[in-house]
Amino acid sequence: MPAIEIRNVKKRYKELQALKGVSFTVEEGEFFGLLGPNGAGKTTLISALAGLARADEGTIEVRGHDVVTDYRNARRNLGVVPQELVFDPFFTVRETLRIQSGYFGLRNNDAWIDEVMANLDLTEKADVNMRALSGGMKRRVLVAQALVHRPPVIVLDEPTAGVDVELRQTLWKFIARLNREGHTIVLTTHYLEEAEELCDRIAMLRRGEVVALERTSTLLQRFAGTQLFLRFSEGALPTELRALEVDTSNLPNGGGNQHLLRLNSYDEVERILSLCRANGCKLEEMEVRKADLEDVFVQVMNGPEVIEGLA
């Protein structure tokens, strides 16, 4: 039984078709990444998953429980860390977590509350009123609220947006531990290095559609692999090499006389340099590097409407 199963989910807001038939599954125990630019439909999908919005068409299940027809069990199995900082200013951190426990009918939950606070470095703030906390501390409390009923499935919507390095490290250490213990994690983030390091599998959304769905390692190999960066002081890239060129818009001072070429093997470097010399190119800078998830993301988002074999 999948941890999350999403089938042909569509959602429209007036003239905007936010989701256009999204389908995928997240397996039990996975660390799954949901990526896409602003406006791709990520938060709309998470809202439908959490019961904050209702899909116009399609179904969503959390561990076999439909989020509409069996919403109580679906929500018991799910913990969501929202993107926005939402808090009640009238309670302390501990009171907030006790109230959150009460929503799920949990009594005598203080031992787990203490453990969650300790792992998120909130213990010293336990009796501090929520309105007196910094933005980073409020975000830690949001994470704690999502975990307080020990949900087997945890969704993190931009959990490290605008927070310091210490919180990132603390959060990922704790979340990685929960994942090792069997919790399913779904992460949305604009910090692609986080997704590359943490996620077993990734879905990419663009304008309400899934345009890539694959294991992280396979995505890196299929779309990018090894790359050769060239900067010329004179000359232009030979026509024969244009087919190997990767979009350079995400590079500093992108475009101009610098080029990024996809390599199938290191053996191709000699042939490429030979063609460049024959074309009158004068090399100013060269670097062979492994592509990262940011390179893949740029290629996918600027690619065709449907990525064959992935969507």
Image (cartoon, rainbow, N blue to C red):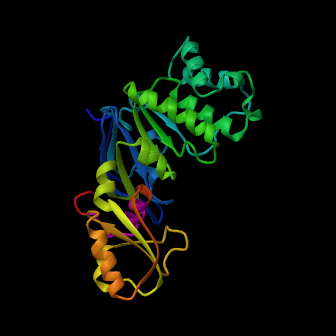
**In the displayed structure image, the side of residue 58 where residue 301 appears, left or right:** right
Q: Is residue 117 above or below residue 44?
A: above
The residue nearer to you, when weighing 33 against 129, is 33
Please say whether residue 126 is visible from this viewpoint: yes
Picture coordinates of residue 286 (x, y %)?
44, 70
Is residue 224 inside the magenta stretch?
no
Picture coordinates of residue 47 (x, y %)?
47, 45
Picture coordinates of residue 294 (x, y %)?
44, 58
Range drawn in magenta = 295-307
Q: Is residue 247 above or below residue 144?
A: below
Q: Residue furthest right?
A: 132
Q: Is residue 296 above or below residue 218?
A: below
Q: Residue furthest left?
A: 309
**In the displayed structure image, the side of residue 23 where residue 145 appears, left or right:** right
Picture coordinates of residue 250 (x, y %)?
49, 67
Please say whether residue 206 is visible from this viewpoint: no
Q: How many marks?
A: 0
| Quarter of image, res 212 | bottom left
For the point 41% across and 30% down, which residue is it? 179
Which quadrant does the C terminus fall into? bottom left
For the point 35% across and 88% down, which residue is it? 279
The residue nearer to you, when weighing 66 against 167, is 167
For the point 34% across and 49% down, which residue is it? 216
Which quadrant does the N terminus fall into? top left
| Quarter of image, res 301 | bottom left
